[in-house]
Image (cartoon, rainbow, N blue to C red):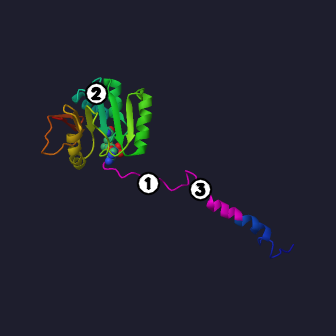
Amino acid sequence: MTRTPFASRPTMRTIAFTLPALALLLSLPLSADQAAPATRPTLDVPYVPTPQEVVDKMLEMAKVKQGDVVYDLGCGDGRIVITAAQRHGARGVGVDLDPERVAEARANARKAGVADRVTFRTQDLFKTDIREASVVTLYLLPEVNQRLKPKLQKDLKPGTRIVSHSFSMGDDWPPEKTEYVSGSTLYYWTIK
Ligand SMILES: C[S@@+](CC[C@H](N)C(=O)[O-])C[C@H]1O[C@@H](n2cnc3c(N)ncnc32)[C@H](O)[C@@H]1O
């Protein structure tokens, strides 16, 4: 059998169907999976969780109790405020710029049964309202603590306790207490 040279050529009918279909396909919005990935927030500090024994020591150092409102600025998976609610009966607010961390923290709070006593905000810690805090916990970086210091001193009420994992506030605001646990240094201040 001889093959006609026209056998594989598109007919006018094929073209008439294909071109509009192609145009439609190109004009369709992309599905969530195909869409360009959402831009990630630019973090001031990378995510590194505080080990649980260090969390326990931070809350013990601040003498967290029922009635306290514990703010963790840069809360990661929420472990500090969740522990404050679960073991000390406090209320907690966690703030993180990364929505993935906030989603994880909310899921962890539900699992721990404290979702009614903790709140997580997807927010920049420099812009969040911290005035109701009675305890603030931090695990940031030295220069971030330095930048945050004026906000802490201006916005927090006298008597508010602050505990920072690993990093101090510089020579001009020395800690009132320093403790060591599992290779970590913890610093403690109160607002005067
Ligand atoms: C070192 S981790 C500490 C996590 C948690 N506090 C803990 O101790 O387990 C720092 C966290 O700060 C968050 N972060 C970085 N820059 C931030 C910003 N400008 N505002 C709010 N969160 C920020 C990061 O996404 C990260 O989860």
Q: Which badge, 2 or 1, comes first in the chain's sequence?
A: 1
Could you tell me which secondary element the residue under label 1 belongs to?
loop
Q: Which mark is residue 39?
A: 1
Which residue in the protein does label 2 denote? 68
Q: Nearer the viewer, residue 39 or 57?
A: 39
Q: Residues within 10 Å of mark 3 (few under 14, many from 20)?
A: few
For residue 32, side relative to residue 38 (left or right): right
Counting from the top left corner in percent of width and height, residue 68 is at 28, 27
Q: Residue furthest bottom?
A: 5
Instruction: Look at the magenta stretch and give its main secondary structure.
Output: loop
Counting from the top left corner in percent of width and height, residue 105 is at 40, 36
Q: Residues within 10 Å of mark 2 (few under 14, many from 20)?
A: many
Relative height, residue 63 to residue 105 (above, below): above
For residue 8, side relative to residue 29 (left or right): right
Mark 3: which amino acid?
Pro
Q: Which badge, 1 or 3, comes first in the chain's sequence?
A: 3
- Could you tell me how far apart the alpha carbons at marks 2 and 1 are, in whole angstroms? 36 Å
Q: Nearer the viewer, residue 141 or 96?
A: 96
Mark 2: which amino acid?
Asp
Relative height, residue 87 to residue 131 (above, below): above
Which residue in the protein does label 3 denote? 29
Which residues, given as a range, are shown in magenta?
A: 20-46
Ligand 1 visible in quadrant: top left
Q: Nearer the viewer, mark 2 or mark 1?
A: 2
Mark 1: which amino acid?
Thr
Q: Quadrant of residue 115?
A: top left
Q: Residue at x 22, y 50 (%)?
A: 143
Q: Quadrant of residue 139?
A: top left
Q: Nearer the viewer, residue 181 or 85?
A: 85
